[in-house]
Structure formats: structure tokens, C-alpha cells
Amino acid sequence: MTDRFAQRLCAEGVGTALLLISVVGSGIMGVSLADGNAAVTLLANAIATGCMLYVIITVLGPISGAHFNPAVTLAFMLRGEFPRREVLPYMIVQTIGGILGVWATHVMFDISVLQFSTTVRTGMSQWASEIIGTFGLLFVIFGGSRSKPDAVPTLVALYITGAYWFTSSTSFANPAVTISRMFSDTFAGINPVDAPMFIVMQIIGVALASFMLPLLLNERRDP
């Protein structure tokens, strides 16, 4: 492994950890301060996540490409813009980083580090939301990269902040995030039983985007 590749993997791991810290931490803080108002808690959760996304994409993008998401890594590979041999290492460090971020958040809020979520997130509406949410995220990333690359951090941050509200699943749209949130029995958690279907739907969203976005964005591929 080259030093450059190790640096990229480290950036992906740290970035995903920070993302999960923002997701889980803001959920815990929101519940603590909102006095039972779920709308206020979700608003805090969405804003904190959007803010963190803007920061980590801006800072770490030049190092690793700022995927922080196995679905994004897979989509780049399917487009021929990411080496196949690097896909699995990226996915592994993203997932490990996410779990470590969850555990670090539990330490910060003085709650049990090792836990599993009991929050039920299932059903056709939430599964459909994960397909649409993942497709939309990839639309923002690749469409934004084509039209205004410098705006991608802002576009992704705005999209995810909004998607917390316009999808019934709050748009996980990220297999590493989904796996990591199994390990937190807090506002942001997901029951481990429900996580596999979320991930399947996210992969379907990737497949849909891989088929539709080249047509939508009028991207020509060499035969």
C-alpha cells in the first residue's frame, strides 16, 4: 500500500466517523433539549448533518474524493471513474470509521458505548425512500460535478438536509451509515433486523442512477 493510498483511506475513515458523530450526536442532543418535540429534534439532526457534510467534503475532498459512502464509491466505479481494486478498501474503512464515530459519540454523551438500536424502520414507504434518496444523492453529486464542481459540497449538504424532511426514512442513502446506526439505540438508530433491506434499496438506487444519469446528463461514453 502506498503512502498516498493510505492517506486516502485515512481521510475516508475520519470523514465517515465525523459524519456519524454529527448524525448520532445531534440526535442525542436534540432529544435532550427539545422536550419531546420530534420536529425540533429532526431539524437539529438535519442541520448538524448538513453542516458536517459541507465541512468534510470541502476539507477532505481533495485528498480522497470525499465519498464517505459505499454507495458513492460503487457508483464512481460503475461509471469507470474509480479503480475496482480500491472499492473494497474504501468500503471497509468507511464502515469502520462510521462505527468508531458512533462509539466516540456515545463516549461524549456518557452513555453505554456498546449497544444495538431498537428503532424500527421498515415498510415499503421507507424502502422506496431509500431508493429515491440514494438516487437523488448521486444525481446531486454527478450533476453538480458536471455543471458546477466547486458547489458540490454545498449541494450535497443542502440535499441531505432537505432529504431528512422529504423522505419517510430520513434518507440514510449510505450503507456505512446504515450499518453504523445499528450500534446506537438513540434517535438516529436503526434496528439491525431492518438494516439489510435499507442497504438493498440503496444498492438499487445506485443501479438506477448508473442507468439513468448518463442519459439525463447527456454523458457520452467511448465504446
Image (cartoon, grey):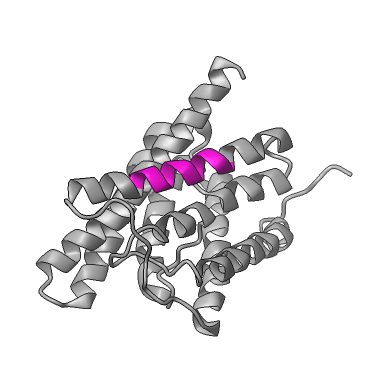
Residue 213, relative to residue 107: is it above or below? Answer: below
- Tell me the quadrant of the picture where the N terminus can be found: top right
Q: Which picture quadrant has residue 209?
A: bottom right
Bounds of the magenta span?
91-101
Q: Nearer the viewer, residue 198 or 65?
A: 198
Horizontal and vertical percent for residue 221? Answer: 80, 46
Q: Nearer the viewer, residue 34 or 89?
A: 89
Image point (53%, 69%), residue name: 130
Horizontal and vertical percent for residue 71? Answer: 58, 53
Left or right? Give the position of 43 relative to 62: left
Residue 173, relative to residue 67: is it above or below? Answer: below
Is residue 98 a member of the stretch shown in magenta? Answer: yes
> Main SS of the magenta segment?
helix
Q: Is residue 53 visible to us here?
A: no
Q: Is residue 171 visible to us here?
A: yes
The single residue placed furthest to the right in the displayed view is 223
Horizontal and vertical percent for residue 159? Answer: 42, 60
Image point (37%, 73%), residue name: 119
Q: Nearer the viewer, residue 84 or 109?
A: 109
Is residue 72 a member of the stretch shown in magenta? Answer: no
